[in-house]
Amino acid sequence: MDIKENVSNARRGFMKAGAAAGGSLLFGFSLFGCSRAGDGKEGQNDRKEPPSEKAVGQAATAASEPAGLAHDAFIRIDRDGIVTLIIHKVEMGQGTFTSMPMLLAEELGADLSKVKLEQAPADNSLYADPLLGGQVTGGSTSVRGAWKPLREAGAKVRTVLVQAAAQTWKVDEKELKVVGGTVRHDASNRSAHFGQLVDAASKLNFPKTVTLKDAAGFTLIGKSTKRLDSPAKVNGQALFGIDARLPNMGIAAVMASPVLGGKVTAVDEQKAMAVKGVRQVLRIEGAVAVVADNFWTAKQGLAAAAPQFDDGPNAKVSTASIVADMAKASEGTGAVATNKGDALKALAQEGGRRIDAVYEMPFLAHATMEPMNCTVDLRPDACELWVGTQVPALAQGAAAKLTGLPVEKVKVHNHYLGGGFGRRLEVDNVIQAVAFAKLAKGPLKVIWTREEDIQHDMYRPYYYDRLSARLDNKGMPSAWFHRVTGSSIMSRFAPPMVKNGVDPDAVEGAADLQYAIPAMRVEYVRHEPPGVPTAFWRGVGPTHNIFVVESFIDELAYAGKTDPVAFRRSLLTKSPRTLAVLNLAAEKAGWGRPLKPVAGRKVGRGVSTQFAFGSYMAQVAEVSVGPDGDVRVHRVVCAVDCGQNVNPDGIVAQMEGGIVFGASAALWDQITIENGRVQQTNFGDYRVMRMNEAPTVEVYIVNSHDEPGGIGEPGTAGIAPAIANAVFAATGKRVRKLPIGEQLKKA
């Protein structure tokens, strides 16, 4: 079979099965859950095996059909009854390696403990996410994208296993049931585990369609389940990218130009090589690496090398100059993201009260617990990467381009990620590691120090927002205007997503307000900061817009002399799901009841609501503020409607983690630039909330059976405005610029 035929078969939306040489049964399914338009061959007996790993790599370059048609993943069942899911998503702490098997096992009737996972090889044509259009883990899309396809795959596999048992035992299929990886016939007291039915099932055709369980029939979905990856992480068996070990591998410490665009001018190789254990000093245009037997020696050698740099064109860039340019850019008219009624005319009218505000959000680093790293084995005819990445196919493509190798000659060994938060959607570390590997003698592991990581991150953009609203004589908003100014990540990451000058991520949470306001206009002004690379940061657009919108809504509530919760309720008449989570959070938080006093400190409650990533959420934060402006978050009540929940325990963990992550940034964190250099270096000046500072977090999940929404990022987006609004309730000081701690100290 040639490559084009192989790819074509892989793209069909119907099930395929084949008896593998090792006695396994393989099943392919489309993550889109639909066939290619006009194929007309759904459900036929086409039992060709799924593409081999070699063919998977070849398919990326051979496919000539439009992107978005080839999104296949595969299931394998062996004769021991072990079900293996070749998974297209990565695990970075969000619980994907538990929720995805749950979806499959629910409809398959498998024993969840016997569902094993294999990381899919790098290939956009076979393993792309149906919502993101590429082999990407991000955007809180894992469960949303796999919700139907994985369940359908499980149901189709179950169907042929039941048919195989019925034919073998000569009984009616309706008399059989599937429980815990076993097909049973109670009337004759016969049973067979999946592995015993593999050979017979491989000879059968798969159904075109299947009927999925309704929520009342779920035995796994909606039930709290222990994380399947926890044992390996506890006993040390789990491997992260930084754990890669190869024979004769050198380990490199790196120093890149402290200013983006700078170049290496001098390196003291002699002093570096004098350090015992140092093997090589490598130099590329913007960075130096010292290779040694271990990382500590490499770090010592790098210090001895004392690299010098020409700062280049961005040497004079500062936060102050960036913000000044951004403020000027924000004065111009932007691309229109939302236009309902005539907001500009309504704002100019007399009567009522007009309120104007400017909000600012700082650059933020990801500061993942596992610093950036990549191990490369580059040979004349092949390249292998060991890494933890959210975008394996992009990493593969970047390495292929840099080495000049065909993409099928680049193999990515993907591992657990020690935190992603969007940082590992980028492949700058892979590009740098491969560039050094081209100069190295033998396999090379490149590790960034924490300082290198924070000072050479790709940062959450700085945003500068202008808002205006008019309240009528009853204190209710009649007009709303919001102009977002900031970097366009989508223009770099996924250019086709930018339509008519509007970056959809930059305005998410602003352009689609749940509040019923008669006249609304939202604009976007793209402004790229010189010398500061920007990227996704656990929510990106919503983390910025939810803060701005919910803070400004709070301003309007107080200006209209209305309770903030009551004010929001009155504007949510056409958004019942948002209203429901608001009411639930307010009830559980005891909104309206006095807070317990904290000696020497002022106390207050704040609220936020949101619709983002397909989920509805409300948060209530309880804070206290000291005379010196120190803010402590004591309690957070979070109500979430994410549609049908898969693993409630996982949702709670995501909300807790997202809230702590977002609260750290809201209270303390920012990346500042002076003379082209990032001023923050480590957790000493880029704080992460400590255990004794973490609030009590209560999570209440709405019992919904709607399509699932995302949960990885909403918690982070909603906490900043809840805290800021609580600070205002406590002190009367409105925070329009983050981080909160710095603003209160200036006040």
Image (spheres, helix red, strand yellow):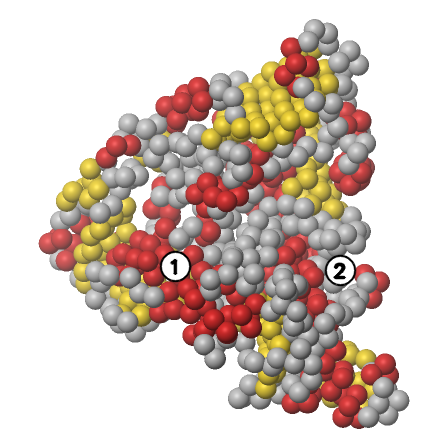
Q: Give the residue at x 79% y 54%.
A: 705
The image quadrant that residue 282 belongs to is bottom left
Q: Give the residue at x 49% y 28%.
A: 525
Q: Secondary structure at mark 2?
A: loop
Residue 237 visible (yes or no)? no
Q: Position of residue 674 (x, y in %)?
A: 33, 29
Decide which of 453, 626 is in the foreground and name it: 453
> Label 1 neighbourhood size at 10 Å, few (<14), some (14-19), many (20+)?
many
Decide which of 361, 464 is in the foreground and name it: 464
Under mark 1, the amino acid is: Gly
As drawn, 713 above or below 153: above
Under mark 2, the amino acid is: Gly
Residue 151 left/right relative to 298? right
Residue 408 left/right relative to 719? left
Q: Which residue is mark 2?
A: 222
Q: Give the residue at x 22% y 42%.
A: 263
Q: Which residue is mark 1?
A: 397
Residue 707 visible (yes or no)? yes
Residue occupying the far right of the picture? 187
The image quadrant that residue 294 belongs to is bottom left
Gap in angstroms between the C-alphas marked 1 and 2: 38 Å
As drawn, 169 above or below 569: below
Q: Secondary structure at mark 1?
A: helix
Q: Give the residue at x 73% y 75%.
A: 207
Q: Position of residue 402 (x, y in %)?
A: 30, 57
Q: How many marks?
A: 2
